[in-house]
Image (cartoon, rainbow, N blue to C red):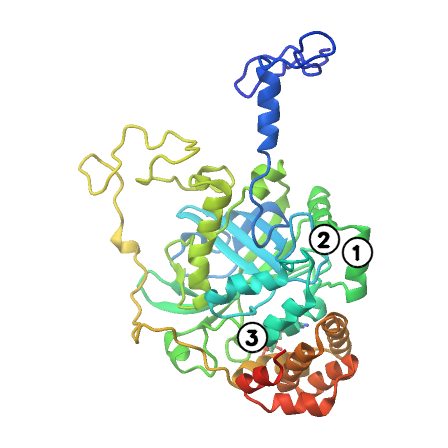
Amino acid sequence: MKNSKRTLTTGFGMPVDNDLNSVTAGAKGPVLIQDAHLTDKLAHFDRERIPERVVHAKGTGAYGYFEVTHDVTKYTRARFLSEVGKKTEVFARFSTVGGEKGSADSERDPRGFALKFYTEEGNYDMVGNNTPVFFIRDPLKFPDFIHTQKRNPATNLKDADMFWDFLSLTPEAIHQVTILFSDRGTPRDYRHMNGYSSHAYMWYNEKGKHNWVQFHFKTEQGIQNFTGEEADRMRNLDPDCATRDLHEAIKKGDFPSWRLEIQIMTPEQAEKYRFDPFDITKIWPHADFPPMDVGRLVLNRNPENYFAEVEQAAFSPANFVPGIAPSPDKMLQGRLFSYHDTHRHRLGSNYHLLPVNAPKASAMDSYQRDGAMRLDNNGGAGPNYWPNSFGGPDPDPALAPPAIDVSGLAARHAYELGDVDFVQAGDLYRKVMTDSDREHLVGNIVGHLKNAQKRIQLRQVSLFYKADPEYGTRVAQGLGLDMKEVQRLAGMSQDERVQATQQ
Ligand code: NDP
């Protein structure tokens, strides 16, 4: 059977004569091992799956561009931000966090918002979320936190006890929990949500002067969320609703866009600010650090092949360009290690050579050599060490980020949990949310927390009460808890509260 002009080949380019019948001894078999086309086909199929990301497994992506709309050269020397009107190619990947690769897009979960800018100074990755804060502020807690969002090790089921036990023992999570259980925890799709760097980063200019900066990508489609009931229904109706929405919008030319705003904090302000500016459980209030416009992100091209371009896309917050550098944020510091590490595990040590990950507007010129699946000429005949006197590339000291002063005792410094950790969750509840936002928030929490043990409910609700007494009271009433007990626990230190609610 031949009905096209092309001839099927093996992976090695040899023409294949028959792709329907294995080579057998006689019509009834057995199959002969000399059928190398059969064994190669089966063996490749057996290896089709690579490890799914341990977080952000379910996602989708698209290409587009970033255009500078405002002059920020006094803050950063990054060349892709050097001129109003300048455009840089971008690849974006959006995702849920806790679910497996086949999980539903409408689950209550933060959403990943990862961008790769293919700049002339190499690839810059901004690996953010749709929430401006996070649950924890020390990377040592991250594996534990994620375990509690996934499945019970015994039952392999999602487990409200694990989920709320950890969160109620981690009071600094209260701000992110409040956002997660508002309707922003179930965005309608990826186009109708914001993206935030969540961390502070350093921006430095040509003169080496630095500031701290937070990024906010504000959707130009407007925020749209599912209510809890709509999200539950959508899980059954179309588990891939956000994936489908992005693909179809771009396919029909309805290109989604976001406005990039930044907040700038000087090093002097950071020294004295009332919140730790590098604590990812806190935002920088707009009144103190007004957002400034920088540019616009537009997504206008769907990938041609999901596995090649989305599954193999590898982002890392450690991919910086001159003009942008890390801040001391402890969670960021942990991520600087973890993202490259996870991609080496998922894709292999040469994953940076895969087309979606390789620089496009600049050339790689390094002394890294060899390793599994080296796809390029491996540096050819050039020197593989530095320093050398054979014309290999040299580092450029002029590009060094400014030195910053750090000092202190090397120790496991604990954050002191204080009333300050409840302020912003309370502000969100009291000042930002509408009546209907508050009603949905309380309903969403009650619907989930009711599945946890009573003592865990009490511990968690006392934290809501500390953020705002009305907030705690409404959740307590929804769960039918004893208000006196909630208030008694809210008045305790965290250690006492934990003691009072042990099994
Ligand atoms: P502002 O009134 O200046 O800003 C409020 C912010 O809250 C806006 O960015 C708005 O985003 C966002 N927002 C509105 N509804 C919700 C919701 N249901 N869940 C999460 N965010 C929402 O106040 P402040 O800067 O003083 O911040 C007050 C509180 O607002 C903070 O404690 C924090 O919880 C929340 N917030 C603050 C942000 C910041 O960077 N300052 C960013 C996001 C949230 P939008 O304009 O896109 O609707």
Decide if ligand 1 comes within 8 Å of the CB at mark 3.
no
Q: Is residue 323 above or below residue 369?
A: below
* Residue 227 appears anywhere in the view: no
- Compute the Cα span from label 2 to label 3: 27 Å
**Considering only order in the chain, which callout, 3 or 1, is on the residue closer to the N terminus?**
3
**Residue designated by label 1:** 234
Mark 1 to mark 3: distance in Å? 31 Å
Q: Position of residue 140 (x, y in %)?
A: 46, 66
What residue is pinned by disc 2? 104
Residue picked out by circle 3 = 170
Secondary structure beneath disc 3?
loop
Residue 2 is marked as none
Q: Secondary structure at mark 1?
A: helix
- Numbered disc total: 3
Residue ID at (57%, 16%)? 36
The amino acid type, in three-letter code, at marker 1 is Met
Q: State whether residue 164 appears in this view.
A: yes
The kind of residue tagged 3 is Thr
Task: Identify the image quadrant of residue 325.
Answer: bottom left
Answer with the quarter of the image where residue 306 lies: top right
Q: Is residue 59 above or below residue 491?
A: above
Q: Front-most of 487 and 350?
A: 487
Amino acid under disc 2: Ala
Q: CA distance from mark 2 to mark 1?
A: 8 Å
